[in-house]
Amino acid sequence: MTSITMPDTAVHFQPLGRKTEPKKGGTLLDLASQAGVSIESICGSVGKCGKCKVIVRSGTSSLSPLTGSERRLVDPRVPGMRLACQARIVSKGRVVVEVPEDSQRGHHRLLAAGTERKVRLRPAVRKTVLKIPPATLKDLRADDDRLMDLLERKIRARPVIADGVHKDLPQALRKRSWTTTVTTFRDCEIIRVEPGDTSDQLYGVAVDIGTTKVVAYLLDLGSGDIVGTESMPNPQIPYGEDLMSRITFTTKEPDGLERLREAVVGGINSLISKLCGAKGIAPEEVLEVMVVGNTAMHHIFFGIPANHLAAAPYAPAVRTSLSVSPAHVGLDMYPFGKVSSLPNIAGFVGADAVADLIASGLYDDRDTGMMIDIGTNTEIIAGNKDRLVSCSCASGPAFEGAHIKFGMRASTGAIERVWIEGGTKEVVVRTIDDAAPKGICGSGIVDAVSEMFGTGILDASGKILVNDGNKGTRKGAGGLPEFVLVEGREAAGGEDIVVTQHDVQEIQLAKAAIFTGVSILMRRLGLKCADIKRIYAAGAFGTYVDATSAIAIGMYPDVPVQRIRFIGNAAGSGARMSLRSTEMRDLAERLSRQVEYVELAAERDFQNEFAQAMFLPHRDVSRFVNVRVSRIDG
Amino acid sequence: MTSITMPDTAVHFQPLGRKTEPKKGGTLLDLASQAGVSIESICGSVGKCGKCKVIVRSGTSSLSPLTGSERRLVDPRVPGMRLACQARIVSKGRVVVEVPEDSQRGHHRLLAAGTERKVRLRPAVRKTVLKIPPATLKDLRADDDRLMDLLERKIRARPVIADGVHKDLPQALRKRSWTTTVTTFRDCEIIRVEPGDTSDQLYGVAVDIGTTKVVAYLLDLGSGDIVGTESMPNPQIPYGEDLMSRITFTTKEPDGLERLREAVVGGINSLISKLCGAKGIAPEEVLEVMVVGNTAMHHIFFGIPANHLAAAPYAPAVRTSLSVSPAHVGLDMYPFGKVSSLPNIAGFVGADAVADLIASGLYDDRDTGMMIDIGTNTEIIAGNKDRLVSCSCASGPAFEGAHIKFGMRASTGAIERVWIEGGTKEVVVRTIDDAAPKGICGSGIVDAVSEMFGTGILDASGKILVNDGNKGTRKGAGGLPEFVLVEGREAAGGEDIVVTQHDVQEIQLAKAAIFTGVSILMRRLGLKCADIKRIYAAGAFGTYVDATSAIAIGMYPDVPVQRIRFIGNAAGSGARMSLRSTEMRDLAERLSRQVEYVELAAERDFQNEFAQAMFLPHRDVSRFVNVRVSRIDG
């Protein structure tokens, strides 16, 4: 029996490239599971939660017709969209099914490291092996000329020799019979000369200094590969949970700036040490460290006073990308290597946002799009290859679980998905690691608000409507309304896990801050929602949050959900791309000047925009025509 | 009585611009004294020593005709040359007399600091005062952009901000209401930003690291003026008297290089501290230190291994001029300033020789000339603006008084001038500060050998001819011949001060080493003595030695003595000129590559040249036709 002549009757799942032989009557959800593809589903495959959306690219005729659930829940504008739990195989034939990112269960974990765009490998540090003509009485040139004359012919540049490298010349030339490896930085500086051929050792480290977390990646710059990743909580946290309190610490405490600086530098040194230890190389083999972070983290790391970031007009001290001596910051690495950073755009749109922009590719898009990196400060860059505008929104820490009664970080037992049955108001939750529920993380609370609003538990002003029809609603402490997500007997702590009126308000404030930025940038560019062809959602929260829910509460603009692309820790990706490619950092430098910065607080109708965005999804419902204000499932 | 209509009957002395009314019958030597001009004279104005040569530029008809003494002693090739003690005023009229440098008594002291050529004041460090537009919500640029955008318009360059200077930006811009002083280095790096206008503070220090002496000059780079000079013995002397023993120390002793480096750096720091203290400024106001020295001193100062300088092919590690961070060498000055050096040419033709070359102006001469800087190693550069060749001669320390029985450094009581009466062999000496004779310094021993040879006490092979006709000659210790310069009863030590046969041989070796270099360079350029239009005599010894004597013993080539120009500590002058002018250092960088280096030891007939040059003045007397081999005065 040969399979060659057999007609293809398999069901193919894209983009993962898996296939399986269909059984008649099986749903696409079953077949996906059989093929090893995990598709989201919360409601128990009864066609109610709408999380298992897929797009059938070919073979529609082999599938059952749309069910009532599907007619209610799928976007009629997207041809081929089905709910995987509803669509069944009715006849043999080749079926190709695309599983959108947002429907892939567990895609979040994969994306946490950040997606990467391919760059031409051209690191700033570069090794050139030279076979140098020996010094003789017929050729009396000095060591530096002898090396440079040859190097110049090879790389067509005559770099200067860095301070401190001159002393290595005599040994580097003579120890291995005049074979010498020269390390240059951007072809304009010689930062190392070594005896023999050491060209197989070329390492760099990319560091993303987040306000809460520091992540470091060890890269083999010969191949471009990531050969190690390490992370740690930002060691500055004990000095201040958020940016503002840290900036205050630098001004109010004696040596405050230096203490914060030393804390983060010490942390990065321990990450470099771990990365190098695991790879079996000495930290002295790390030739360049590329750092990104928001403007305050950037300034503090380099010992630059950050106090002016705290007051209008919030001007950063330094925009330009830096490359300084390791001794200057105190990093343990090759002592004449470089500590570099990407440029900043503004006081609250820093090198991390520039890295996001590079990682997203938005700067190169013909179509108009938007990059949103949600955090305590949310950076937004909107536009396309012709024009880019940016802003920063004070979205606060609610999405990280702060100020939410049962809020917690995204760890085991955190409720990360919520679905509410429209009729019975029965709640289904999914927790991280499927553990007993402990609390609610950012994506969970957004889902909860979205579902509560969608099922009429919340009104458009965000008020919890306590009544008999809304099962689970009640008056809580101080007589304030609340909604029970998980009853005590099912919760890890034995206590009811609830969403309070105050929690809802916190989410409204946060999402309003973000949408105000979105809205003002859209107006600046003269855009309608339909013009936004792509949203790049960056950062951990942006990756974990359910895009449909985020649109439903009016945090993201009202675009078809397929237009949202999750790019994970894009700051880290951008840092790595810049470490691999000087083109990327030159681009970053250009972009940091080109991207227009909009200071939201200085916009005339900022207050009005914000007030309107407090509504669910917005006071102007014409801006969210695809969000059904009240949903009756059935 | 009005003087306006009176004819000018004065005697004018040039280049000092003094004049006096002549008395009939007075000698030019008397009139010079009357006019406050000191002319050399040793023999007591009897027309015998020939030291008082002057050139009568006009008014010859007012003077007595040439005497017999003059016909013997003056160079017939020089029109108007007279002996000042012989030429008398015979009639009224305007007489202009030029006193050549070598006949000016005491000119040596004045020249010790080095003559300077005027340069266009354009230091590498430059201050620009900016009135910066304040940051507002309408102008959100970062501090660096704000400063750079304006600076770029002013200086037409966009320099990078040096490591460590970024942190000063916020304060420098805001503290004096957005008036900021920016210090740039070569228009390509911002090394300082300060609040307010500090443009009146612009200081640099030039340092000449000699093997035996370190001299530092504090310069106000706003005016170009020298505002202080300090010197000290090289603190490396305890580790080795001469270069070779110091190079050996760097290789044989643990941390030898670092110990020598720290010694000289410590010395320079104390000089900077003294200079600044005297001027009432902080060492942190010194923005640049420009260092010159021979190649070994240069390498040791920068911590570059010098051991390869000690063995063929004597290749230096570094030719190129350097500009490094003060932290890198440990100088106490403005921490983000620069420590710079001029380039080296070869292992034994260093940055000091490049400084000599710059100070001499030889590189720009149409006529062919020669720069000779005599020391333990004598550097010679010959040629003109089209081509320059250089070499180094191992002339040894005899001219510094070493290895000479009564040798001493040029200090109080040292015999610095010697004249011997041709007939009677009576000796006249002059000592420094006219003190009782203690010993003989370099210029004294050269005079002595020259006079001994000129009066037949030495034969051409340098042998002291002990006989009754040569009063003062005798057999000394070990039966070796010697010549008494000063009898014990006139000497400070009570002992006869003698020149031994061994002393004469030491001088022959030293002068032969120099002339071999001179001769090989002349052959390389195809020159005869007559082609040499100028000899620039650099260094302390070159300034103090009597040019006629130096030619007479065959150390300098046989040129009319007027062609010898004394340029004093030209290394110091060149360092100062380079500190004042980037053009000069660019020139130095070009010259250091253009000047051809001749390794004497690798020349085929080096041995033969050297053997011939051991004779007085030379075995080939046709090369010294103007030196009378035996002189009968009277």
Image: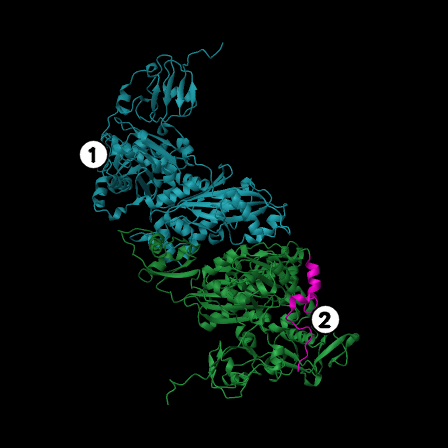
Chain colours: A cyan, B green
Q: Where in the figure is residue B133, as x and y percent of width and height?
A: 29, 56
| Of labels 2 and 1, the one closer to you | 2
Q: Which residue is mark 1?
A: A621
Q: Provide the secondary structure element on which disc 1 rests.
A: helix
Q: Quadrant of residue B408?
A: bottom right
Rendered position, B558 above or below B24: above
Amino acid type of the residue tagged 1 in the rendering: Val
Residue at x-position 38% and y-position 13%: A93
Q: Quadrant of the C terminus of chain A?
A: top left
Q: Identify the chain of the residue marked 1, using the numbered disc in the image.
A: A
In the picture as drawn, the residue positioned furthest to the top comes out as: A1
Left or right of B321 on screen, residue B477: right
Residue at x-position 42% and y-position 65%: B202
Range of residues picked out in magenta: B605-634
| Tag 2–tag 1 contact (CB < 8 Å) | no
Q: Provide the secondary structure element on which disc 2 rests.
A: loop
Membership of A231 in magenta stretch: no
Q: Where in the figure is residue B40, as x and y percent of width and height?
A: 57, 80
Q: Which residue is mark 2?
A: B462
Q: Nearer the viewer, residue A179 or A420?
A: A179
What secondary structure predominates along the stretch shown in magenta? loop
- Few, some or many residues within 10 Å of mark 1 (<14, 14–19, 20+): some
Q: Where in the figure is residue A385, as x and y percent of width and height?
A: 32, 37
Whether marks 2 and 1 lie on the same chain: no
- Few, some or many residues within 10 Å of mark 2 (<14, 14–19, 20+): many
Residue A309 visible in this rendered orientation of the protein: yes
Q: Nearer the viewer, residue A349 or B83?
A: B83
